[in-house]
């Protein structure tokens, strides 16, 4: 086999690799970072913005602390009702949504059943007549 044939075989192998990679990426679309309901969520963006602004105006940012296998959320005021959304950046199938209600300023949640690693925690709650929204990264060991 001369050098001309080797170049043709090498180029054909490379083209097959590129075509195969393209087909694999198209058929195995697993981009979990894209919100499936992005169009519907865009309609409520004003509410989310107002909730974030309420958080800043009222200095109501909650404090999250992880001790052993318990996540403690310390709120600024009492009577908080809402939901916690745990989003896993690397695998959207592990996302969890947990409703909560607390009479006092503290809410505790056991996280021993959660997969260890990076999470994004979204807290959406209502206190009195105001809505609040807070997003924070969390690393569970």
Image (cartoon, grey):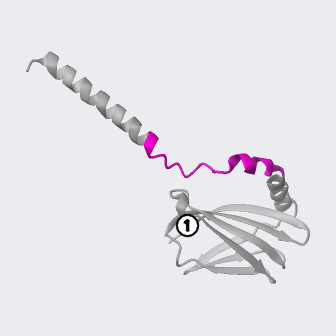
- Where residue 20 appears, as percent x and y from the top left, is 34, 36
Q: Nearer the viewer, residue 99 or 57?
A: 99
From this view, report whether residue 45 is shown above or below residue 111. Answer: above
Is 104 inside the magenta-drawn segment? no
From this view, report whether residue 107 is shown above or below residue 116. Answer: below
Q: Which residue is mark 1?
A: 139
Residue at point 56% right, 61% down?
88
Is 41 inside the magenta-drawn segment? yes
From this view, report whether residue 17 is shown above or below residue 73. Answer: above
Helix, strand, or loop for circle 1?
Answer: strand
- Where residue 3 appears, as percent x and y from the top left, is 13, 18
Report whether 90 appears left or right of 62: left
> Which stretch is magenta?
26-46
Q: Residue furthest top?
A: 4
- Where residue 117 appears, as percent x and y from the top left, is 50, 65
Classify mark 1: residues with Cα within 10 Å, few (<14), some (14-19) or many (20+). few
Q: Nearer the viewer, residue 98 or 60?
A: 98
Report whether 66 appears left or right of 102: left
From this view, report whether residue 12 is shown above or below residue 135. Answer: above
Residue at point 40% right, 37% down?
23
Q: Quadrant of residue 134?
A: bottom right
- Where residue 92 appears, as percent x and y from the top left, is 55, 58
Q: Residue furthest left?
A: 1
Quadrant of the frame with the N terminus: top left
Q: Residue furthest front?
A: 27
């Amino acid at each position: 086999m001369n050098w001309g044939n080797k170049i043709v075989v090498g180029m054909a192998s490379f083209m097959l690799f590129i075509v195969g990679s393209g087909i694999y990426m198209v058929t195995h679309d697993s981009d979990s970072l894209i919100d499936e309901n992005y169009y519907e969520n865009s309609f409520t963006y004003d509410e989310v913005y107002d909730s974030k602004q309420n958080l800043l105006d009222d200095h109501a940012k909650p404090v999250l602390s992880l001790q052993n296998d318990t996540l403690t959320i310390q709120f600024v005021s009492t009577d908080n009702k809402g939901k916690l959304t745990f989003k896993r950046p690397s695998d959207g199938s592990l996302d969890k949504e947990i409703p909560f209600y607390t009479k006092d300023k503290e809410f505790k949640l056991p996280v021993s059943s959660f997969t260890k690693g990076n999470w994004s925690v979204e807290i959406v709650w209502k206190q009195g007549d105001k809505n609040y929204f807070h997003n924070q990264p969390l690393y569970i060991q």
